[in-house]
């Protein structure tokens, strides 16, 4: 029995010395034959099955007490300063020692692997590596990640510098002048940022390959460097995109960026995991590692799209401003939106930029409209479904609705010369989409169902896709107000002002009218057609009357059919007798030409071509009739007070004071003393023709919509006064219902409850009404 125990103890000592050489007491490990004999003895005593468990426990104890503390001591604050980390070999030394410690266990693992029974689910080597990683890296110091990132950052820069050197012309092929130029370019290495004669890039790359080989053999490559490599590559991608693409909208960058990612970044990633291709350092990787590399490359490509898309989204407002020159940037961004989830970021960023940079009181309505048109065109490139335009453009549409001159600016843009505005060009397009049609009916194309695509997930389900996909910009602008009648009235007003200010081209206006008929329909623009016909008829009548020779004075009239024209401003003006005589002669001539018809003159409208002769000068001017009448009165006497002139012309003093400044600025009239105006026969000499001043040009001949609405409200006021006279007091709702019953039944003019409340409240403020207990009534002393 004693001999048996001695044999068992000797066998266990032999196994310990053979499997744990770091702890064995023998001078050298036993041979394989001796080790096998010892294991056989243990097996005969029935204790061989505990060898593997004992081995793993002993290895874990060694890891916790010796290997682990020694490894982490390399990265402690006491043993290393911040400048000692990185590319100086500290990281490589630490993992070299770690690799040596683990390698001392690997022969024992092979021996125990052969003793294991077949059918084991996990190899002993995989189990050892798993325990090794679990115990060693369960608690990593914060400084370790910084050391790893610093090392791989230096290695990445060294690799880039090496690639740049390889891409340059070799010294044998370059001439001496080229070599001198390269030396003058930079004396500092772009990789290690040291002087070129002290460059350490080669040393860094050597350490880089050594470390990767050691980590690969330990199965720790992705575990140790994965996070650092990802962060470095992400930083490099962001930096490269920022330096290459920021502010450049006229070129496409996605394809060159993808090529750069594959040739520079991904190739470096392969260097990390596979080593240098075709060299001794190249490593074979498992199918699992290759699959991980493929996924990594896919994620990097996604990050590239995301980073580039984020940059373009931040510049989207400027991209829209520079459209169509920025078409390349839009096409790139479209690809990014298809491959990433940046749509919501685009909507939020662009809405914010529009509110901050465009929808401000200082921006003119024309600028807002121009930007909206560019927005429509740009977003149609990114999203033909129109969902992005719907999400972003609604803010501009709501804002335009609050501007008083939006309709007028749209109409003016539509009727400008071709090429003068985007709207005019849009109107000139062939085969336009009428407002009734909206978009082409899908039923017209039997194969339309094959092209159908669902709306994006962020589309508003309450709106139809057909309304979004209309390519017609004019229809989008008209839909801001939801009514084409408003635009037709405004077009009538714009056309009227052009005709009565004689600032029109009849051929262009006829062309515009025909184009607008295609959009709005012929019946809607019948009045405008009559207006242009009046212009043509007036020319014929003027030619006939001129042949009668009106006392040598050329008088041309614009004869309008009043019921077809917009409401004109009614202002009084008494003309000088000599001028009125010419008008009367024209009327008599007209009655001769047009039997049973006469003329009702509007003397305040039109243009007067004057030749003025003074002592030392002669002037030729074309002015408003009021301005012309002012200077003509100074033919009778040289001094007029403002009240005298106002009485003679039947024009308010406030209007006269503003109009007379034209002649003051021209040096013909001087105010002296205040309220009295004197003709200056002598003064500075002015040559050339003078057109109407800015005040005259901007004044409209037609009544504004506000003025017309005030007249309509006065009609309702008559009804309200009658109601309150008979019924004493009424609440707002009752007044509105009675107006609908009596005033609006046979009248196309309508008034909303909100408009009526605002109108009645204004009467309360002017003390024409009283409001008590929610009821309106007339004051007692009216």
Image (tube, grey):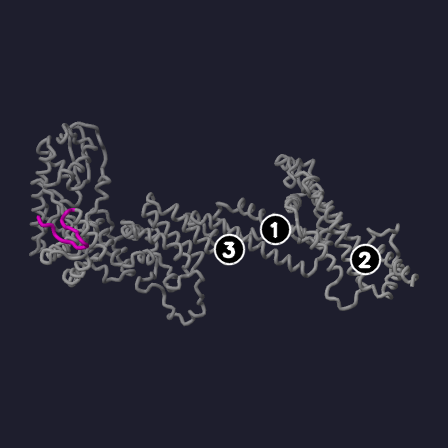
CA–CA distance in space, label 1 to label 3: 21 Å
Q: Nearer the viewer, residue 363 or 470?
A: 363
Q: Please name the residue shown 64% across and 52% down the image.
A: 226
Instruction: Please state which of residues 203 and 11 is positioned toward the viewer in this rendering.
Output: 11
Identify the element where label 3 is drawn: helix
The Cα–Cα distance between marks 3 and 2, rounded to whole angstroms, is: 54 Å
Q: Residue 190, which numbered label? A: none
Nearer to us: label 1 or label 3 = 1
**In the image, is residue 768 part of the stretch drawn in magenta?**
yes
Mark number, residue 336: 3
In the depicted view, which residue is nearer to us: 312 or 329?
312
Specify few, some or many for label 3: CA neighbours under 10 Å numbering under 14, 14-19, or 20 or more: many
Q: Which residues are magenta?
A: 766-782
Mark 2 to mark 1 CA distance (whole Å): 36 Å
Quarter of the figure with residue 469? bottom left
Residue for badge 2: 108
Query: Do residues under tags 2 and 1 come within 8 Å of each other at their CB atoms?
Result: no
Asked whether the viewer can see residue 98, the reply is yes
- Residue 160, given in percent of the width and then of the height, sits at 64, 45
**Horizontal side of residue 766 vs 48, given as left or right:** left
First-in-chain label (3 vs 2): 2
- Name the N-terminal-most of marks 1 and 3: 1
Q: Residue at x 79, y 67 (%)?
A: 117
Could you tell me which secondary element the residue under label 1 belongs to?
helix
Residue 580: give x, y in percent of width and height.
Answer: 8, 43
- Report the residue that reaches farthest toward the front: 1
> Residue beneath label 1, please?
230
């Amino acid at each position: 029995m004693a001999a048996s125990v001695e044999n068992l103890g000797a066998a266990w000592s032999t196994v310990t010395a053979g499997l744990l050489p770091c702890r064995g007491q023998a001078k050298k490990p036993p041979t394989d034959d001796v080790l096998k004999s010892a294991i056989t003895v243990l097996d005969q005593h029935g204790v061989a099955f505990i060898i593997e468990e004992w081995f793993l426990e002993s290895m874990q104890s060694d890891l916790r007490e010796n290997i682990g503390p020694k490894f982490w001591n390399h990265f402690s604050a006491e043993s290393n300063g911040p400048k000692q980390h990185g590319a100086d070999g500290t990281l490589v030394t630490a993992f070299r020692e770690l690799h040596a410690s683990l390698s001392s266990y690997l022969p024992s693992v092979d021996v125990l692997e052969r003793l294991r029974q077949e059918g084991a689910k996990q190899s002993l080597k995989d189990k050892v590596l798993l325990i090794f990683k679990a115990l060693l890296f369960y608690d990593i110091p914060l400084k370790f990640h910084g050391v790893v990132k610093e090392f791989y950052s230096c290695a990445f820069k060294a690799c880039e510098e090496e690639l740049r050197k390889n891409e340059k012309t070799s010294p044998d092929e370059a001439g001496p002048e080229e070599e001198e130029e390269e030396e003058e370019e930079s004396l500092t290495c772009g990789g290690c940022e040291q002087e070129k004669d002290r460059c350490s890039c080669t040393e860094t790359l050597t350490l880089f390959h050594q470390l990767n080989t050691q980590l690969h053999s330990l199965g720790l490559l992705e575990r140790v460097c994965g996070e650092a490599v990802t962060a470095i590559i992400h930083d490099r991608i962001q930096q490269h995109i920022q330096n290459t693409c920021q502010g450049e909208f006229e070129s496409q960058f996605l394809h060159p960026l993808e090529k750069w990612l594959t040739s520079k970044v991904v190739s470096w990633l392969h260097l990390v995991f596979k080593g240098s291709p075709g060299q001794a350092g190249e490593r074979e990787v498992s199918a699992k590692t290759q699959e991980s590399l493929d996924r990594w490359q896919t994620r990097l490509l996604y990050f590239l799209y995301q980073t580039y898309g984020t940059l373009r989204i931040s510049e989207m407002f400027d991209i829209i401003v520079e459209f169509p020159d920025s078409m390349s940037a839009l096409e790139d961004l479209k690809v990014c939106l298809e491959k990433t989830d940046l749509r919501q970021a685009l909507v939020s960023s662009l809405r914010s930029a529009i509110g901050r940079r465009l929808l401000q009181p200082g921006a003119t309505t024309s600028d807002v409209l121009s930007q909206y048109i560019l927005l429509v065109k740009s977003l149609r490139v990114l999203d033909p479904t129109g969902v992005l335009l719907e999400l972003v453009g609604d803010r501009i549409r709501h804002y335009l609705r609050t501007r008083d001159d939006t309709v007028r600016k749209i109409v003016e843009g539509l009727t400008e010369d071709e090429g003068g505005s985007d709207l005019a060009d849009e109107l000139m397009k062939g085969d336009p989409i009428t407002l009734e049609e909206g978009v082409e009916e899908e039923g017209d194309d039997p194969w339309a169902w094959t092209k159908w695509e669902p709306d994006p997930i962020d589309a508003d389900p309450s709106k139809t896709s057909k309304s979004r996909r209309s390519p017609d910009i004019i229809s989008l602008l008209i839909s801001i107000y939801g009514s084409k009648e408003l635009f037709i009235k405004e077009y009538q007003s714009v056309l009227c002002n052009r005709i009565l200010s004689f600032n029109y081209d009849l051929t262009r206006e006829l062309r515009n009218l025909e184009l607008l008929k295609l959009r709005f329909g012929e019946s809607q623009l019948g009045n405008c057609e009559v207006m242009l016909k009046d212009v043509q008829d007036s020319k014929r009548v003027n030619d006939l009357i001129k042949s009668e020779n009106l006392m040598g004075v050329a008088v041309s009239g614009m004869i309008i059919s009043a019921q077809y024209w917009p409401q004109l401003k009614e202002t009084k003006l008494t003309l000088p007798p000599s001028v009125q005589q010419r008008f009367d002669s024209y009327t008599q001539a007209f009655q001769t030409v047009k039997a049973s018809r006469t003329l009702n003159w509007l003397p305040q409208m039109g243009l007067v071509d004057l030749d003025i002769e003074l002592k030392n000068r002669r002037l030729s001017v074309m002015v408003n009739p009021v301005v012309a009448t002012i200077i003509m009165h100074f033919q009778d006497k040289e001094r007029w007070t403002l009240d005298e002139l106002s009485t003679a012309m039947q024009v308010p003093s406030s209007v006269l004071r503003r109009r007379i400044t034209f002649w003051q600025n021209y040096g013909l009239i001087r105010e002296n003393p205040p309220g009295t105006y004197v003709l200056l026969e002598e003064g500075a000499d002015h040559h050339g023709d003078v057109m109407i001043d800015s005040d005259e040009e901007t004044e409209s001949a037609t009544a504004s919509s506000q003025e017309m609405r005030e007249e309509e409200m006065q009609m309702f006021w008559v009804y309200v006064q009658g109601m309150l006279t008979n019924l004493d007091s009424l609440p707002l709702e009752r007044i509105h219902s009675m107006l609908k019953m009596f005033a609006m039944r046979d009248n196309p003019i309508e008034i909303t409850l909100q408009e009526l409340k605002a109108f009645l409240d204004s009467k309360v403020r002017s003390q024409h009404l009283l409001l008590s207990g929610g009821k309106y009534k007339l004051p007692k002393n009216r």
